[in-house]
Image (cartoon, coloured by chain):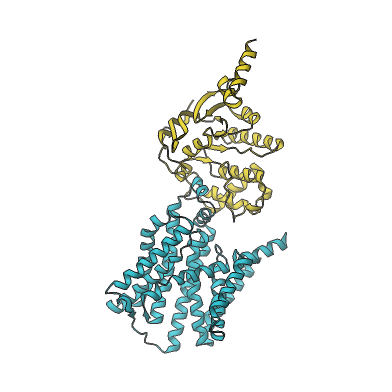
């Protein structure tokens, strides 16, 4: 399989804190890679490093075998890597449609795009994510779940090849989570977009991911199929504590 | 349909203003020329402050550069007015580019203060240069026309620059470039993540703003026939333009012109009727608008109509 995105010994210090500690990772083309870990494990920081928002302290990141370690966020976006933010960052003072339009006008190398084509693209992605009926709302006037959906819609309008999703399901109810899962599958299969997704909703991450990578205190502690990862003692320990993990191993042995 | 009505109204206004000096020469022409000048300044500031969100109080530096370029080229080198005005625009744009690249990294009040600093530095430089006449100022050659024709000349000149500024702003409000600026104002981090090269867009926006501010300054110098550094590098020019923009509505095409018209007319009225209360009454008007229409007159009425439609 072809690696579309790859990191080698990716490291980020914030002062004395190693937020991301020498992590090797890769994402195959067409894959959905889940990224999990307890709070403060360095998941969002890793996304920030890929996306160019923070410079790396050490290590290298490659996109299609090209070194993109020192690229700025706008250059990363032009290459075809789009992201959503955990704390949503809509553009206030614009309507939902205009927010998405900015994504369609920029993103992946769109210097010559006509306004007409951009608007066509906007309608297309708005219909896909189910925000079409709210397209003329001021962005300040929509609910939090809709804002999360808007983040995703805006990222899709950028025509990405790789999508980095940071907790797009947090705060959604079970029905809404189902919708997003269906949507992510659709984006991955029909639009052929590679996805790296951070998520706390375990049921969802198990269902969508082809492979899961686990971070804990900035270090990678597991990287395997969803089934293997949830049964990995180190992962259970990271999430539920040492005692629980030992007990569980004992029970399994019986 | 609404758009067609709006265009008809705008054409009537433009037509009326174009014929105004023919029918009402004199005082009114001068007042309107002043409104056009501030309309241009507020619109030019709107591009960087209203659309992009970078409050450049120090935009008066470009006004001064435009004014002094015209003054120096005409008085010292015997140039015609127009090439002097164009050169002023070019110098202002280059200056905005050179200063903008480092300064536009600053955000919020830090940027604003830095622009005030740049303006102050330029004021001192011009004060101490010989070819600008230093602190004593510089006198420009008089225009050889009857007073009425002179007033009309500056009226049409200022009017043309204002229309050009509005046209550019309108074009900007509809295209990719304008959306980049609005995205930067709304959330610069997200704008970057979407693929917007913010430093380039911000600097270009400031350069456009600088060009029109310099044009207005150039015309002003020729109009007044005498300028001195503290007059044209007056930080209050930037502050006043900002208040006008805020009053009418930043980030809208016509807001700054509406704001400039209201403030200049009220100012003219108050000035001639209550000389001593002038600043106080203006201050009260500003406080009231900021409190009740924080996003300006245009946004205030737009919201009203939107609510009415829903």
Quadrant location of the N terminus of chain B in the rendered image: bottom right
Percent position (x, y) of residue B122?
Answer: 35, 67
- Front residue of B240/A210: it is B240
A91 or B154, which lies in front? A91
Work out whether residue B232 or residue A32 is closer to the camera in this orientation and state it.
Answer: B232
Identify the image quadrant of residue A85. top right
Q: Which chain is cyan?
A: B
Residue B120's place in the image compared with A218, above or below, is: below
Q: Is residue B231 above or below residue B94?
A: below
What is the letter of the yellow chain?
A
Q: Is residue A76 visible?
A: yes
Q: What residue sits 43% from the left and 56% below the top?
A: B104
Determine the residue positioned at 54% across, 54% down: B186
Does residue B254 appear in the picture of this structure? Answer: no
- The image position of residue B223, as x and y in percent, is 41, 81
- The extreme top residue here reads A254
Relative image position of residue B302 (x, y in whole percent): 65, 64
The outermost residue toward the bottom is B146
Q: Would you say B91 lies left or right of B107 here?
A: left
């Amino acid at each position: 399989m072809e690696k579309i995105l790859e990191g080698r010994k990716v490291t980020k210090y914030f002062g004395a804190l190693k937020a991301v500690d020498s992590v090797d990772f890769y994402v195959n083309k067409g894959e959905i890679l889940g990224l999990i870990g307890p709070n403060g494990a360095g998941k969002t920081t890793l996304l920030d490093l890929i996306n160019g928002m923070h410079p790396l302290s050490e290590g290298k990141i490659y996109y299609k075998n090209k070194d993109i370690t020192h690229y700025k966020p706008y250059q990363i976006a032009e290459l075809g890597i789009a992201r959503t933010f955990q704390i949503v960052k809509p553009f206030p003072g614009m309507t939902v449609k205009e927010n998405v339009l900015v994504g369609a006008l920029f993103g992946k190398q769109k210097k010559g795009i006509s306004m007409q084509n951009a608007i066509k693209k906007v309608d297309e992605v708005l219909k896909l994510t189910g925000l079409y009926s709210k397209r003329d709302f001021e962005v300040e006037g929509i609910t939090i779940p809709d804002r999360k959906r808007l983040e995703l819609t805006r990222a899709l309008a950028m025509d990405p090849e790789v999508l980095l999703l940071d907790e797009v399901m947090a705060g959604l109810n079970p029905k809404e989570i189902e919708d997003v899962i269906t949507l992510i599958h659709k984006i991955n299969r029909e639009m052929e977009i590679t996805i790296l997704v951070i998520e706390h909703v375990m049921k969802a991450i198990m269902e969508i991911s082809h492979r899961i990578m686990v971070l804990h205190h900035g270090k990678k502690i597991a990287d395997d199929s969803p089934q293997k990862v949830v049964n990995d003692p180190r992962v259970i320990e990271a999430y539920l504590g040492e005692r629980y993990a030992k007990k569980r191993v004992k029970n399994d042995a019986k | 349909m609404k758009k067609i009505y709006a265009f008809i109204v705008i054409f009537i206004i433009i037509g009326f203003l174009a014929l105004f000096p023919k029918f009402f020469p004199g005082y009114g022409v001068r007042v309107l020329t002043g409104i056009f000048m501030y309309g241009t300044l507020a619109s030019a500031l709107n591009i960087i402050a209203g659309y992009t969100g970078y409050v450049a109080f120090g935009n008066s530096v470009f006004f001064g550069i435009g004014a002094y370029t015209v003054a120096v080229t005409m008085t010292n080198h015997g140039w015609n007015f127009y090439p002097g005005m164009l050169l002023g625009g070019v110098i202002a744009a280059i200056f905005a580019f050179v200063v903008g690249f480092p300064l536009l990294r600053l955000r919020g009040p830090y940027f604003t203060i830095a622009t005030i600093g740049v303006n102050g530095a330029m004021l001192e430089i011009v004060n101490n240069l010989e070819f600008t006449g230093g602190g004593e100022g510089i006198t420009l050659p008089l225009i050889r026309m009857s007073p009425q024709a002179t007033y009309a000349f500056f009226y049409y000149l200022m009017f043309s620059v204002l229309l050009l500024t509005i046209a550019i702003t309108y074009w900007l409000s509809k295209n990719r470039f304008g959306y980049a600026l609005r995205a930067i104002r709304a959330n610069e981090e997200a704008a970057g993540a979407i693929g917007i090269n913010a430093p380039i867009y911000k600097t270009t926006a400031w350069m456009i703003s600088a060009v029109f501010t310099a044009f207005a300054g150039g015309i002003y110098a020729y109009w007044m026939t005498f300028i001195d550094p503290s007059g044209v590098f007056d930080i209050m020019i930037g502050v006043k333009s900002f208040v006008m923009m805020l009053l009418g509505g930043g980030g809208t095409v016509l807001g700054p012109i509406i704001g400039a018209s209201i403030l200049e007319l009220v100012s003219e009225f108050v000035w001639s009727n209550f000389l001593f209360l002038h600043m106080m009454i203006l201050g009260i008007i500003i406080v009231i608008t900021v409190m009740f229409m924080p996003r300006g007159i245009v946004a205030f009425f737009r919201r009203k109509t939107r609510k009415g439609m829903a």
